[in-house]
Image (cartoon, rainbow, N blue to C red):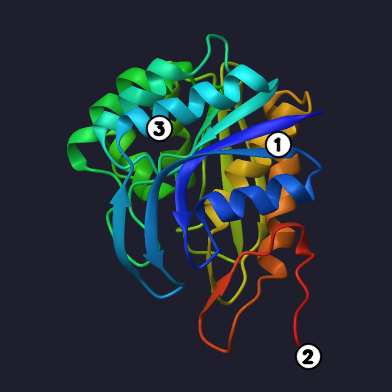
Amino acid sequence: MISACSIAGSDSGGGAGIQADLKTFTALEVFGLTVVTAVTAQNTREVRGTWMLPPEAVRAQVDAVADDFSIGAWKTGMLGNARNIRAVAGALPDGAVLVIDPVMVSTSGYRLLDEDAVTDLIELLIPRAAVVTPNLPEAEVLAGMRVATLDDMAEAGRRILDLGAGAVVVKGGHLAGDTAIDILVDRDGVAEASGRRYPYSVHGSGCCFSAALAAYLARGMAARPAFAAAREFIDTAIGRAVGGPGPLRIVNPGGTILRRH
């Protein structure tokens, strides 16, 4: 059985976090395991509240799944604070294949990672990551520079790579243009993958992309082909996003959710 584990927060709206990760794993025929770090009260418009789990609960969940499953890849999303980052770092098995989605702020602008926890993320988890997948604001924080162009994205990726990660995917969704371009940086250089830019915003796309990347790694792909496959997967998930008539929709992993016509 191929399995992957998401270490992240619960999204009561079902569009991001643990819920999006499990839908993505299922769409890619990977058995999904979870470690819940936080409970959130949210929908597509706002995060109304967050409640962090204590670090001993986070560590106990990691220990429980690691003791009973052969886990092909681990993925972190919302970790919330330094205590939970330390708990995850202390509990992850040696040699774990790790994808880090450095969730810092929600789409609606709600802070999801304490500012004083960034140093712990950089020092304790990023050096263990197979791939780190920041969006542009997150890349700016991790790289310590402004990111406004494709060249900036590549330079930010190199700086984050120097923190010890195996590869870095800087997601370019925040840049203007007809296409959304993501850049992978690893020891072999730079690779690009692009997709159509849709005329609406999507809740949960970062979670879905990093979960897809983890699923492909769990299935035995190397980072570069996993990046290309995950980019194709998220393009479908965004293109078939679900929701009402407003500007914000919900990512649709695999494009399989039934929509009312």
- Give me the C-alpha separation between circle 2 and circle 1: 31 Å
Question: In what element is the residue under mark 3?
Answer: helix
Q: Amino acid at mark 1?
A: Ala
Query: Which part of the image, by quadrant, shows the C terminus?
Result: bottom right
- Indicate which label's residue lies in the foreground, 3 or 2: 3
Question: In what element is the residue under mark 1?
Answer: helix
111 relative to 28 in the view: left or right: left
Neighbor class of circle 1 (other Cα within 10 Å; few <14, some 14-19, many 20+) is many
Q: Which residue is mark 3?
A: 58
Q: Nearer the viewer, residue 129 or 153?
A: 129
Q: Residue at position x 33%, y 47% from top?
A: 104
Q: Quadrant of residue 142?
A: top left
Q: Can you give x and y, in whole percent of width and height, for residue 132 in the image?
A: 49, 32
Numbered tag placed on residue 107 in the rendering: none
In the rendered structure, which disc, 3 or 1, sits on the residue that comes first in sequence? 3
Q: Tell me, yes or no, if residue 166 can be seen here.
A: yes
Q: Amino acid at mark 2?
A: His
- Give me the C-alpha separation between circle 3 and circle 2: 41 Å
Q: Which residue is mark 2?
A: 261
193 relative to 57 in the view: left or right: right
Neighbor class of circle 3 (other Cα within 10 Å; few <14, some 14-19, many 20+) is many
222 shown above or below 234: above
Q: Which residue is mark 1?
A: 215
In the rendered structure, which disc, 3 or 2, sits on the residue that comes first in sequence? 3
12 shown above or below 39: below
Q: Can you give x and y, in whole percent of width and height, for residue 24 in the image?
A: 69, 50
184 shown above or below 68: below
- Give me the C-alpha separation between circle 3 and circle 1: 22 Å
